[in-house]
Amino acid sequence: MSDATILHADLDAFYASVEQLLDPSLRGRPIAVGGGVVLAASYEAKAFGVRGGMAGRKARELCPELIFVGGNFRHYQRLGDAAMAIVGDFTPAVERISIDEAFADVAGCTHLFGPPEAIADAIRRRVRAEVGLAISVGVARTKHLAKIGSQVAKPDGMVVVEPEDEATFLHDLPVELIWGVGPVARARLAAIGIATIGQLAVAEPESVARLLGPAAGEKLTALACNRDPRRIVTERRAHSAGAQSALGRRPVAEAVVRPTLRHLADRVASRLRAKGRSGRTVTVRVRFSDLRSVTRSASLPHPVAATAILAEVAEGLVWAALRDHPEERTISLLAISVSQIEAEASALQLDFALGLADERLRPGARAGRSRLAADRAIDAIRDRFGWDAVGYASVALDRARSVPDAFRALAEKEL
């Protein structure tokens, strides 16, 4: 039997395809989910250059016939779950990495269902027949190769990469197919003449490390050289919790930054509290209009799960990052993540010497404990009456967010 037993199954243009499934009049037409910002685009829209994260105005310029739809978020979850359940019918070794894609190791079930390519074909046929959506599958020896295979197979295809063909398969593919190479890294690599995976594989590792940073350089060089020891992980404990907001092109202003960060902090902190977790390190990411990003982090002396504390720490980090880039006048994305996750203490002792001057930012101080108590009251009301039943005024009074909350809830990584 071939060693190529890892599958990567990825639903094609998922959100847009669901909209076309639910409304047959949209089939074959260029559509985008979203409004102010494109959340997802159909293949018909992508042919005009429309992409996720693009401002709605720009998308309409590229494709005047573009149809925007608001999004059927409940159906996204239902249909994504149904498709991934079909993958699970063939093997218990499934690692779901998002609502619409998963890895699977079929080495232990070929005696039941045939060789890996037959299993991949059966998954594709069943998803099409039972769910009504197209799914592309890559089959390879490693997760890295299987994921690239599924991207090459799109739309609605299958690619099998046998071990003896791996180097040839990778050599001429664009470098951005490597997991982790975004627009910024692609542009930096292009500046030194690296456009394909084969070129990255033979590049001087020191040059790549200087360009992308030591950790990213080492990781991407290894993947380009086809070194990927990762195995399927069916249960994963989250090392961080995060949320992000695509803004289109918004001015660097408190009226934009503060409500957005409050909303993101509310999302992240409520998920931490729901799981009885808190975290010590807060990281923010700011993306500018040219897609360059900067990050800032702070490690706190005590783990936090209070929305207001997280929001204020994040706000301080964002403004510090913006002060370092005074030439930037617009931002396109803000993100917050919390790491160094640990179980939340059942009772916080009063603390007055944790290194934070403002006692409102000290979880164990009187004001900090009051903030957490207010959060728990909000959590209880939302559990009973829904997320929109109550919230912080600074967020509730700003209803012009570009990305609907329901889409964020699907896209955010589960804690």
Image: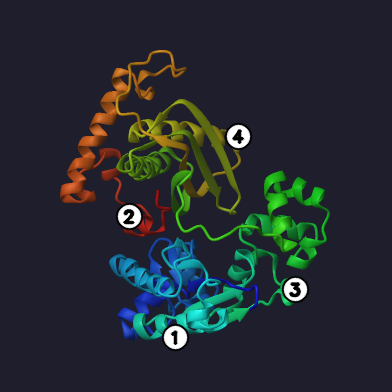
Q: Which residue is mark 1?
A: 125
**Label 1 vs label 2: CA separation?**
33 Å
**Label 1 vs label 3: CA separation?**
30 Å
What residue is rendered at 44% in x and 75% in y?
A: 90
N-terminal of the pair, mark 4 or mark 2, is 4
What residue is rendered at 33% in x and 85% in y?
A: 24
Give residue 405's mark. 2
What residue is rendered at 24% in x and 50% in y?
A: 387
Give residue 172's mark. 3
| Local crowd size for mark 2, using a 10 Å CA cut-off: few (<14), some (14–19), many (≥20) | some
Residue 333 placement (x, y as % from top left): 49, 50
Q: Are marks 2 and 3 in contact (CB under 8 Å)?
A: no
| Local crowd size for mark 3, using a 10 Å CA cut-off: few (<14), some (14–19), many (≥20) | few
N-terminal of the pair, mark 1 or mark 2, is 1
**Label 4 vs label 1: CA separation?**
53 Å
Q: Nearer the viewer, residue 72 or 12?
A: 12
N-terminal of the pair, mark 4 or mark 1, is 1
Q: Nearer the viewer, residue 323 or 78?
A: 78
Q: The N terminus appears in which quarter of the rendering?
A: bottom right
